[in-house]
Amino acid sequence: MLMGWLAKDLAGNGVIGAIISNIGIWVFVSALIAVYSPEAVRAAVHVFLYFIGVIAAYYTHLFALGGRVDMGQVVYWIIFAAIGALIGFIDWHAGDKEWLGAGCAALPISLLIAEGYPIYHSMSVSLGFDIVCAIILYILLAPGKNQKLMALPFIMAFTFALVYFDVFSKIFGGWI
């Protein structure tokens, strides 16, 4: 809930505000929550509750500051939380052996790389942070040389698909 409160409080205020308002930190934290959950269904529930907490704190803070809460946006973010729960369920399987684990580990890493790839022309600190988070997840989610090598084709394919089809702009309306 603290992240949602801070995302509203610090939005547009320097580097920390840009990082905490960026979707990359949310993907990073949710991937860690999912992977370190005891079982797959609980990973999905934990990620969903994390996103609901962030969303609730954000909109509560907005409302407390006298802002207008658009219910359409709230529903949109609740659907995002449900999709995040599905991704959390998939992320939990990153610990599996062979190709299944590699493919599951590649999903959050690809999301972060696809979001952060425009850093080559924008030099944005928040996009650089997304790339750093992707590297950290690559190290944590693909333990061992074989898992890391097996994850690379998935990461490249998923990232290419996300970038080529401009998924983030289509989902988030171009504000990422």
Image (cartoon, helix red, strand yellow):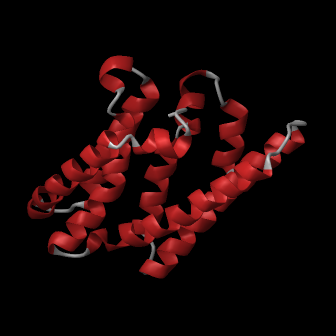
Q: Residue at x 15, y 63 (%)?
A: 147
Residue 176: where, in percent of width, then height? 50, 34
Task: Give the side of residue 20 with respect to residue 142, left or right.
Answer: right
Query: Is residue 132 something that shows in the picture?
Result: no
Q: Residue at x 52, y 33 (%)?
A: 174
Out of 46 and 167, give the one closest to the viewer.
167
Image point (60%, 30%), residue name: 17
Residue 84 in the figure: left or right of residue 10: left
Residue 75 place in picture, x, y as percent: 70, 57
Residue under the image location 21 percent in, 65 percent down: 102
The answer to whether 14 is drawn above or below residue 60 in the figure is above
Q: Going by the image, does 30 lie left or right of 152?
A: right
> Which picture quadrant has residue 131?
top left
Identify the image quadrant of the N terminus. bottom right
Say which quarter of the image contains residue 98: bottom left
Residue 115 place in picture, x, y as percent: 39, 39
Q: Is residue 12 above or below residue 66?
A: above
Provide residue 4's location: percent of width, then percent of height.
67, 47
Is residue 160 placed above or below 144 in the rendered structure? above
Number of numbered tags placed on the structure image: 0
**Residue 48, can we see it?**
yes
